[in-house]
Structures are given as structure tokens and as C-alpha cells.
Amino acid sequence: MLLPGLLCSAALWRAQVLGLADVADSRVMNLTTDATMPAMAARVLEQAPDTFALAGLSMGGYCALEIIRQAPERVTRLALLDTSAEPDTPDRTEIRMQWIDEAAAGGFEDLIPRHARMYLPPSRLGEGALAATVASSARNVGAAAYQRNQKAIAGRADSRAVLGTITCPTLVLCGRQDMATPLALHEEMAKGIPGARLVVIEDCAHLSPLERPNEVTAALRDWLTA
């Protein structure tokens, strides 16, 4: 079960779905319907098999940790990519509310390149295919779902206390140049989860499955087959 991040469509995981087809029946979940993280996690659980391996990036990672909170016995393996176990700070929540208001007022299209600059390193913003995928994914998600997802992210619980309860094999992966959820957050998560493996992808920022698909697919293959 693959969980996308904010403004990310199934295109985020396309390379991994194809690259892992020999070892996994991968399903990319739609997280755009709900405005709270508990509801988002419950919807995934309704659609999931009895037990499953679970990978989430950014917002998908927040949802994955909420799934662990709700139904830990159903998750056989966990991968947390470019995400955080911490809650929003008040300052960050205030910024999200401003973005929600801007999208509601018709400014969603202007938000897309601003988010791209947060997600991608400056050296890759000019890469046509990558930038086009990021922009088209955001438009596929749309302004209404963006507002719901920002509310869910802003209201998410502090998951740091959950980390020590995780007993399944866990991968924590981060792009070294990730500005949205920096490496230090992943080092903290890896230390908090018993037996977790930390993988750092070089020359990579926040959207690691898109930016470095081969390296991320290899790390997920090791996680699935070890």
C-alpha cells in the first residue's frame, strides 16, 4: 500500500509500482477525500487487505503513522519516506491556513510553483519532465482536495510516542537535500523505532520516488525482501 504526499498523484509511485512488480502487488491509495488524518487512515484501512506492507511519503507518512496508531497488527512492514513524526508547529499551521485561504480564493495555480520550490532542489526545477510531473500531479489533485489535505496535515497528532511501539521491519528514507522534512527528523524517527533502517538518498530533496526512482526502488526492494 503506497500513500502519496500533498499535491501528489499516483505518478509519485509509478516507478516503484513497475520496478517492484515481481515482488509486490502495489496499490497507490487516494488520500484526497478526507480533511482529518484519522479519517484518512480509516479509509485506507477499509480498502486494504487484512495485512499489508505500508509505505508513505510526507503526508502519506503522517497517514501511515496514524494507521499504525489505529491498526498496528495489520501492518507487516513500514516505510516512512521524507516525512516526520512531529506535529505541526503553530507557525506552520498558520502558514497552512493562509495557503488554504489562498486556494479558496482562486489562487491555487499560483501555489503550485511555490510548493515545487519547496519540494525540489533548485538544480532540478528546470528539468522539464520532472517539473511537468510535479505540476500535473498537483493539478490532478486540485484546489478542493488540497484544502482538505492541508487541514488534515495541520491537525495531525504527535506521533513520536508511537515510534517505540512499532515492531514490524521499518525503513526510514530521506533525500539529503530535503528542505520540507529535513534529515534530522528522519534520524530521530530511526532512533525511536526499534530496529529501523535509515537510508539517505544523495542529491535528492523531498520527492525522492520521483527524483531518484532507481535508488528508492532498490531501498524498497531490500525492505520488502529482507
Image (cartoon, helix red, strand yellow):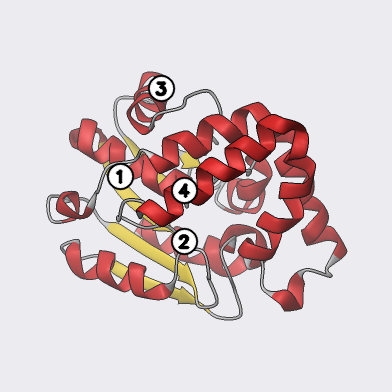
Q: Nearer the viewer, residue 192 or 104?
A: 104
Q: Which residue is mark 4?
A: 94
The amino acid type of the residue labelled 1 equals: Leu
Judging from the image, what secondary structure is the residue with disc 4 in? helix
Task: Name the spot of residue 12 as percent of width and height, x first.
Answer: 63, 49
- Looking at this rendering, what residue extends furthest in the right direction? 128
Q: How much space separates mark 2 and mark 4, taking CA atoms? A: 22 Å
Task: Name the spot of residue 136 as percent of width and height, x first.
Answer: 79, 43
Q: How much space separates mark 1 and mark 2, taking CA atoms? A: 13 Å
Q: Quick check: can you spot residue 31?
A: no
Q: Which residue is mark 3?
A: 43
Q: Which residue is mark 1?
A: 65
Judging from the image, what secondary structure is the residue with disc 3 in? helix
- Mark 1 or mark 3: name the one nearer the start of the chain: 3
- Mark 2 or mark 3: name the one nearer the start of the chain: 3
Label ID, residue 82? 2
Q: Are marks 1 and 3 in contact (CB under 8 Å)?
A: no
Q: How much space separates mark 2 and mark 3, taking CA atoms? A: 22 Å
Q: How much space separates mark 1 and mark 4, taking CA atoms? A: 23 Å
Q: Residue at x 35, y 75 (%)?
A: 184
The amino acid type of the residue labelled 2 equals: Asp
Q: Quick check: can you spot residue 46?
A: yes
